[in-house]
Image: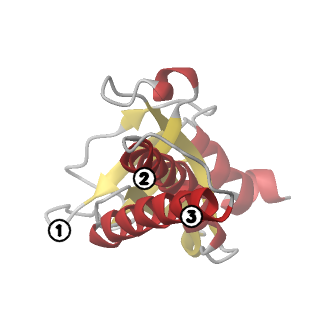
Amino acid sequence: MFLGYIGAIAGGIGLAAMLLIVSKLFRLKLPRWMYPAVGGLGMILLTVHIEYSWYDQVRSNLPEEIEVVQTFDYSVFYQPWTYLIPRVNRFVAIDHTTARTNPDLENMVLVDVILMERFSPALIATNIINCQDGERVLLGDDTELDENGMPVNGDWIAAGLDDPLIAAACARHSPQTSS
């Protein structure tokens, strides 16, 4: 975030300096207010570019095994252009390298879910996904498991088979969909 501010200030100063050089080279008589206005506009445009390119930059740096399954658009009143063109400020991804199945529980997939949000550290949440019923449960430190490896005290979320997280995990790891 701090480097974004430094970059925006440098971009604004650079744009104002370019205008000053062009006006001196071509002997243009520009109003004095034009230089700080162009510098401010440059800062705003660079900041908007950084905000809109965050998701693409983060996604391009993810390994192939990490699949983005859902994105969330963001609009806010102090950035009115986001109502016309919303930007992605967070997303959900699955780390397929951590996915595990249990031969005794064919419809269940254990997978790490990555939650990424702009200006926040990544969160990794381990979930058990029921590919038959379209349910998932978050596993925490206090989750107790029975002898089959199923959570005893977990709260199952009935998201449905069309939920992007459940659909992506089951499409790749469930024995029913793999065969």
Residue 138 lies, in percent from the top left, at 32, 53
User: Which of the marked residues, 3 or 1, is nearer the chain's N terminus?
Assistant: 3
Residue 8, numbered label: none
Residue 124 lies, in percent from the top left, at 36, 66
Residue 18, numbered label: 3
Instruction: Determine contact: label 3, label 1, CB under 8 Å.
Output: no
Q: Distance between the residues labelled 2 and 1?
A: 51 Å
Q: How far apart are marks 3 and 1 (CA)?
A: 57 Å
Q: Name the residue under label 2.
A: 39
Out of 150 and 17, give the one closest to the viewer.
Answer: 17
* Residue depicted at x 30% and y 59%: 119
* Residue depicted at x 42% and y 24%: 80
Side of 76 relative to 72 (left or right): left
User: Which of the marked residues, 3 or 2, is nearer the chain's N terminus?
Assistant: 3
What type is the residue that disc 3 sits on? Met
Q: In this view, does 96 lie above or below 94?
A: below
User: Disc 2 on helix, strand or loop?
Assistant: helix
Q: Distance between the residues labelled 3 and 2?
A: 10 Å
Q: Name the residue under label 1.
A: 141
Out of 98 and 119, give the one closest to the viewer.
Answer: 119
What type is the residue that disc 1 sits on? Asp
Observer-side mark, 3 or 1, equals 3
> Outermost residue, left direction?
142
What type is the residue that disc 2 sits on? Gly
Q: Is residue 98 visible?
A: yes
Residue 85 lies, in percent from the top left, at 58, 28
Out of 22 and 43, give the one closest to the viewer.
Answer: 22
